[in-house]
């Protein structure tokens, strides 16, 4: 059974850097084709894909946020870390991590429960 | 900044069939697979359809997906009260070199 859980601060101040950790079990990020993605959802709004890291350390970022995002993995700890710099109140959202199955055009499945991050002074 | 357009809402009575559309472009839906996710109130999204029309194990066959050109659709037949949720389409976008999600559709069972 694959599970993922997000952790990190619930409140950050504007201009600060957010660091979120996704801790997973039930799969290995060393398996060919596997990946972990980050997606966020502002309150009452739609989902927005942020970043994706693959088993071979290939990384993809949302073009609109690329300059602010860094995604890394620690396979020994079964963790993926997302950092977002220069946080702003508009970045207030629930942040999800999700498993990307191996294979061509694989979906995100399953997702973690999400963690709400509020940006406020 | 959703690039895939969905109707904000859809509704039906129990047992009815409801269809949700997802409109994109040649760089996303037109050239790539479409996924559908269901988000029940207060929960994380769950995969409903992948590769346009494939259902993961455990997803009832009341849910079906289709794609034509630069648009896709999700149909829910035999609507049930537990289908009340938000539904999102998604696809890879070749121009953005990233994933894009739809604007989301809230389904209400009357």
Image (cartoon, grey):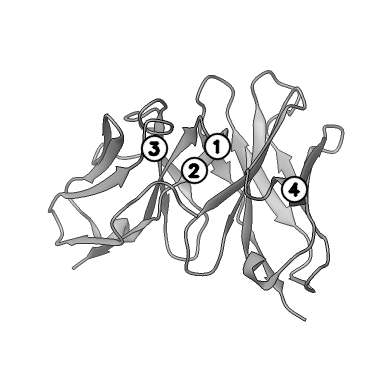
Tag count: 4
Q: Nearer the viewer, mark 1 or mark 3?
A: 1
Precedes in sequence: disc 2 or disc 3:
3
Disc 4 target residue: A67
Is there a contact, CB below 8 Å, between mark 2 and mark 1? yes
Disc 3 target residue: B58
Q: Secondary structure at mark 4?
A: helix
Disc 1 target residue: B96
Q: Secondary structure at mark 2?
A: strand
Direction from residue B19 to residue A61 in the image, left or right: right
Residue at mark 4 shares a chain with residue at mark 1: no
Residue at mark 4 shares a chain with residue at mark 3: no
User: Which of the 4 image quadrants contains residue A109?
Assistant: top right
Residue B14 is at least partly visible in this image: yes
Direction bottom: furthest residue: A121
Q: CA distance from mark 1 to mark 3?
A: 32 Å
Q: CA distance from mark 2 to mark 1?
A: 9 Å
Residue displayed at 73% across by 27% down: A58
Q: Nearer the viewer, mark 2 or mark 1?
A: 1
Q: Position of residue A74 (x, y in %)?
A: 85, 36
Residue B100 marker: 2
Indicate the chain on which mark 3 is placed.
Answer: B
Is disc 2 surrounded by few (<14), some (14 to 19) or many (20+) residues within 10 Å? many
């Amino acid at each position: 059974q694959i599970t993922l859980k997000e952790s990190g601060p619930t409140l950050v101040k504007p201009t600060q850097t957010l660091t979120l950790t996704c801790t997973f079990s039930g799969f290995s990020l060393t398996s060919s084709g596997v990946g972990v993605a980050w997606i966020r959802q502002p309150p009452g709004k739609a989902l927005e894909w942020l970043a994706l890291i693959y088993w071979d350390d290939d990384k993809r970022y949302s073009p609109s946020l690329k300059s602010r995002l860094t995604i890394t993995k620690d396979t020994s700890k079964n963790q993926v870390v997302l950092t977002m710099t220069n946080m702003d109140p508009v970045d207030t959202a629930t942040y999800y991590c999700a498993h990307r199955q191996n294979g061509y055009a694989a979906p995100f499945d399953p997702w973690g429960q999400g963690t709400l991050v509020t940006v406020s002074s | 900044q959703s690039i895939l357009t969905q109707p904000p809402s859809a509704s039906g009575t129990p047992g009815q069939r409801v269809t949700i559309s997802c409109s994109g472009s040649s760089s996303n839906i037109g050239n790539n697979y479409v996924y559908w996710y269901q988000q029940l109130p207060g929960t994380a999204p769950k995969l409903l359809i992948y590769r346009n029309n494939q259902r993961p194990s455990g997803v009832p066959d009341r849910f079906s997906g289709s794609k034509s050109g630069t648009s896709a659709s999700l149909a829910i037949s035999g609507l049930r009260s537990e289908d009340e949720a938000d539904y999102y389409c998604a696809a890879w976008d070749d121009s953005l070199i990233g994933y894009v999600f739809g604007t989301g559709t809230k389904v209400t069972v009357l």
